[in-house]
Image (cartoon, rainbow, N blue to C red):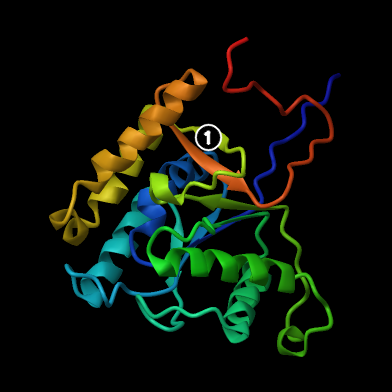
Amino acid sequence: MKLIPMPDLSPILAFGAHPDDLEFGVGGVIALETAAGRPVHCIVCSRGEAGTHGTPSERTAESERAAAILGATIEFVELDGDARLEIRHAHAITLARLIRRHRPGIILAPSLVENQHPDHHRLGRLVRDATRLARYGGLAELKAQAPHACDQLLYYALSTDAEPRDLSPILIDVSSQAALAAWQAAMEAHASQLKTRNYPALQLARAAVNGARCGTTTAIALYPNDPLVFASLAPVSRSARHF
């Protein structure tokens, strides 16, 4: 009898600087993964206090509705507040505690490209640092929790300007009807932010371009912090180029 390897369904921990970042940037991937049975926990590091539209309480409620649509859980972490985030060791330790508590296999974070909202790339850097600190057994601030090493840190880009130019993306096919419907509904849950721009249409258009690159209708790009390692060629399904 041939044994078929079971898929890795270790949890995903997804970080966003503001309410709506995760939904707009990587909501389709979250919907796809939770539908497959993988737990996804979202951590939002402000309540959108500096936003032009929507109060912090309104934006918190929008995020909670969106997470439920995506099949994810959610919590909010108070750092410096919206548009005030600074890179501090104490913040990296706070995020490392969350990583040790949730013990994810995969972490999603905003890209490190600086030509975007300053909170985005700063949070990406803090998550990158926290992912490393969570591994170290000798840090006094983290002694209460067992060390944890995640398998992959992947970045998402909230706009074309935030896409890393020096990293080849992983393109995740999110063209299933269920994933697309959940993604669009989660983005539309942030009604306060749609007063500024039709963000769902913008993100779906970006995903359509990525889909065209790889022979499907809709795809989301993720960017690995480190080279991916495979035990064999079996998990490598295909490339974006059609030879």
Which amino acid type is marked by label 1?
Answer: Ile
Please name the residue shown 49% across and 80% down the image: 86
Helix, strand or loop for disc 1: strand
Q: Can residue 192 be seen in this view?
A: yes
Give the residue displayed 62% in from the left and 22% down from the top.
Answer: 239
Picture layout, residue 49 above or below residue 39: below
Q: Is residue 17 visible?
A: no
- Outermost residue toward the left? 195
Q: Where is residue 107 in the image (x, y as percent from the top left)?
A: 60, 57
Residue at the (32%, 36%) spot, across then down: 204
Q: Position of residue 175 (x, y in %)?
A: 42, 28
Tally the marks.
1
Point 79% across, 40% down: residue: 229
Query: Residue beneath label 1, please?
Result: 172
The N terminus - image quarter: top right
What percent of the width, then of the height, locates residue 29?
Answer: 48, 42
Residue 48 placement (x, y as % from top left) = 30, 72
Nearer to me, 21 or 84:
84
